[in-house]
Image: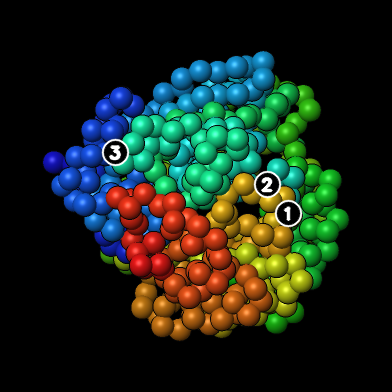
């Protein structure tokens, strides 16, 4: 019997039964069998979406991870043609030794290419390179009872735009041709400095973002008063010299899921204070491997288990530049007052490079992401308060991380939803789309 699949946050608790196939030629029949048996389905990659956007309304998904082959590579131009189930980690294993890197990567390398396109993921260099979708040259798209379409900016352009950030609703991505980024070494040269409050973050961001490829900040989400928004600012660039080896990352593992979350106010407050003080007051240079820089949590297998059997929700919003500092101050104050939050709270300025996708999340402004152990008070008290601040500031939430957003907030923040709904394959439906649209 197959083990049920879940989203990464394990909330909502909606176990998914899966079907998969070994070869692309088998996909149409597998897709059709699921539709015949359940009416609707949804492509599912490696389960790294946090909320319900990767969960089928029918609770029966088409598991794409087994389609994990590299089809073709042009190492002179840095282009790869891959099946949709290939993970970003698998790309890096073959690309780095040849002097290429992902042009955009999120905070985990364990997402699939299909998932990266469907959620139009972004990373620490959004201000320089935009979203993942900008580096997708074309992809194959299978709609139910149709032939596979090759979608590109000049071939089925409406479906190309709707599928990038389209949450897997326009069809099943079969394969993709992506453009890589040239590098000289696998190491990252970074500078790290701590800051005392939110105002200092904005000053550092204005000074350092324009001259570095990568930029991100950790913040202490429980700090109050004059310390609100204090944290650690990190910028980085690909090293100009060094080896092109893919060093093995030491892995730890959370062996089981405890009955209750290990993240609580006492442990969180102690960790955040210690983590902030451990970092330097003055900017400090550091050279590291790419994995600790981009994927700190990937070194802990099954880290989502620390939140206990009820799981967790991530709250990720982006707020336009004009209102970002004031709105984020209110958001952080609300979180600190509630005494809730996460040990990994990430603040990042997004750039103004447009995405080719209709429903891409980033906009010119600042993004905040942090995790909360699941409890009823989140959706009764804290999240409505945060949502009101984000709504008033003209911001929006990230569908790939969401499990609570109201339909009215989604439709207001993503006005292109009607175009996506018009192009949606009616046999594909997620719990998220059913919740916010249908």
Secondary-structure class at tag 3: loop
- Residue 432, by quadrant, is bottom left
Mark 3 burial class by Cα count in 10 Å: few <14, some 14-19, many 20+: few
Q: Is residue 387 above or below residue 186?
A: below
Its colouring scheme is rainbow
* Horizontal side of residue 380 vs 226, given as left or right: left
Residue at the location (17% across, 45% down)? 36
Q: Is residue 31 left or right of residue 116?
A: left
Q: Name the residue that disc number 2 marks.
A: 130
Query: Is label 2 in a helix, a strand or a loop?
Result: loop
Question: Which numbered tag is attached to residue 145?
Answer: 3
Residue 208 appears at what percent x and percent y? 82, 52
Q: Position of residue 370 (x, y in %)?
A: 54, 64
Q: Label 3, label 1: how many angstroms apart (C-alpha)?
A: 40 Å
Q: Which residue is mark 1?
A: 351
Image quarter of residue 226 = bottom right
Kindly check if marks 1 and 2 are in contact, taking CB atoms under 8 A apart as contact: yes
One can see residue 63 in this view: no
Q: Which mark is residue 29?
A: none
Of the residues tagged 3 and 1, which is closer to the observer? 3
State left or right for residue 271 relative to residue 40. right
Residue 383 in percent (x, y) is at 48, 77
- For the residues labelled 3 and 2, the Cα–Cα distance comes to 34 Å
Residue at the spot 26% in from the left edge and 51% down from the top edge: 40
Measure the alpha-carbon separation of dots 1 and 2.
Answer: 7 Å
Question: At 15% across and 47% down in the image, what residue appears?
Answer: 37
**In the picture shown, does residue 47 fall above or below 412?**
above
């Amino acid at each position: 019997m197959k083990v049920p699949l879940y989203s990464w946050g394990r909330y909502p608790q909606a176990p998914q039964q899966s079907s998969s196939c070994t070869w692309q030629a088998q996909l149409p029949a597998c897709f059709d069998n699921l539709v015949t048996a359940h009416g609707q389905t949804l492509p599912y990659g490696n389960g790294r979406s946090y909320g319900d956007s990767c969960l089928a309304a029918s609770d029966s998904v088409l598991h794409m991870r087994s389609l994990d082959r590299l089809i073709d590579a042009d190492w002179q131009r840095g282009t790869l043609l891959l099946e949709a189930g290939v993970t970003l980690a698998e790309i890096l294993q073959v690309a780095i030794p040849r002097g290429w890197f992902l042009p955009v990567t999120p905070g985990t390398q364990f997402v699939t290419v299909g998932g990266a396109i469907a959620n139009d993921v972004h990373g620490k260099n959004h201000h320089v390179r935009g979203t993942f979708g900008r580096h997708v040259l074309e992809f194959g798209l299978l709609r139910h009872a149709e032939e596979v379409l090759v979608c590109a900016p000049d071939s089925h352009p409406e479906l190309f735009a709707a599928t990038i950030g389209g949450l897997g609703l326009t069809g099943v991505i079969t394969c993709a041709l992506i453009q890589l980024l040239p590098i000289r070494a696998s190491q990252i040269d970074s500078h790290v400095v701590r800051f005392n409050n939110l105002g200092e973050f904005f000053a550092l961001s204005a000074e350092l973002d324009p001259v570095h490829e990568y930029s991100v900040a950790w913040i202490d989400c429980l700090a109050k008063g004059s310390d609100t928004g204090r944290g650690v600012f990190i910028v980085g660039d690909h090293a100009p010299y060094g080896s092109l080896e893919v060093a093995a990352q030491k892995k730890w593992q959370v062996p089981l899921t405890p009955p209750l979350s290990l993240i609580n106010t006492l442990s969180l407050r102690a960790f955040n204070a210690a983590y902030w003080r451990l970092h330097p007051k003055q900017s400090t240079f550091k050279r590291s491997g790419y994995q600790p820089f981009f994927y700190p949590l990937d070194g802990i297998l099954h880290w989502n288990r620390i939140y206990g059997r009820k799981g967790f929700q991530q709250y990720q919003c982006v707020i336009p530049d004009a209102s970002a500092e004031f709105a984020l101050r209110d958001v952080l104050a609300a979180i600190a007052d509630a005494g809730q939050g996460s040990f990994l709270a990430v603040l990042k300025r997004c750039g103004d490079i447009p995405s080719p996708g209709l429903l891409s999340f980033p906009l010119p402004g600042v993004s905040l992401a942090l995790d909360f152990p699941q409890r009823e008070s989140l959706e009764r008290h804290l999240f409505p308060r945060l949502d009101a601040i984000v709504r008033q500031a003209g911001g929006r939430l990230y569908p790939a991380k969401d499990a609570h957003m109201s339909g009215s907030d989604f439709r207001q923040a993503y006005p292109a939803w009607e175009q996506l709904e018009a192009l949606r394959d009616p046999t594909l439906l997620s719990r998220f789309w059913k919740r916010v649209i249908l």
